[in-house]
Image (tube, helix red, strand yellow):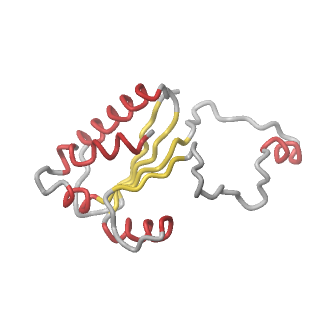
Amino acid sequence: MSLQLAWNNEQEEYGISEELIAKLEELLRLAGESEQITDGEVALTFVNDEAIREINKQYRGLDKPTDVLSFAMQEMGEDELEIIYDGDDGDLSDAAALEGDEFEVEEDFEEPLGDIIISVPRAIEQAGNTVTPLSGSWVSSSFTASCI
């Protein structure tokens, strides 16, 4: 097991290079070392301004785009609501017992640490258009602060 970066590009305006992903994977590793976290998965999604505006409105009540949103899976803040899935009382052993099966975690399962959503156009704009998406520096500080 290790720290993993699962990424998805849902915008078409800017390309996401393998070089950028390699830099972000290194940032994740360094952030993990800093926080003494060795296992887990961070989901990273690149979107456009409209998509992040919708997510910002839905989850934060702010009807405007932003550069980065992050959602931690392991922490509960004062104002955060616990996610309860339909029929889920939080005890997985009960569900397994009802079905007569033991609950097993897959060997290659990585615990989700959180989601990071980056608006590529907004991040570039906020960086002052002085860097390109290929350089990776336009997201490094936000990514590092958000990933763990």
Image: 135 above or below 32:
below
| Quarter of the figure that contains the C terminus | top left
At x 31% / y 62%, what residue is drawn? 11
In the rendered image, which quarter is residue 19 located in? top left
Image: 133 above or below 53:
above
Q: Nearer the viewer, residue 8 or 38?
A: 38
Q: Where is residue 133 in the image (x, y as percent from the top left)?
A: 20, 51
Image: 113 above or below 62:
above
At x 13% / y 57%, what residue is drawn? 129
In the rendered image, which quarter is residue 66 located in? bottom left
At x 45% / y 47%, what residue is drawn? 43
Q: Is 86 situated left or right of 13 in this image? A: right
Q: Position of residue 38 (x, y in %)?
A: 49, 26
- Disc count in the image? 0
Residue sticking out furthest to the front:
78
Residue sticking out furthest to the bottom:
63
Q: Is 66 situated left or right of 5 in this image? A: left
Q: Where is residue 61 in the image (x, y as percent from the top left)?
A: 47, 70
At x 50% / y 46%, what residue is drawn? 114
Q: Which of 3 and 35 is in front in this view?
A: 35
Q: Is 90 situated left or right of 136 in this image? A: right
Q: Which of 16 and 91 is in front in this view?
A: 91
Q: Where is residue 30 in the image (x, y as percent from the top left)?
A: 36, 29
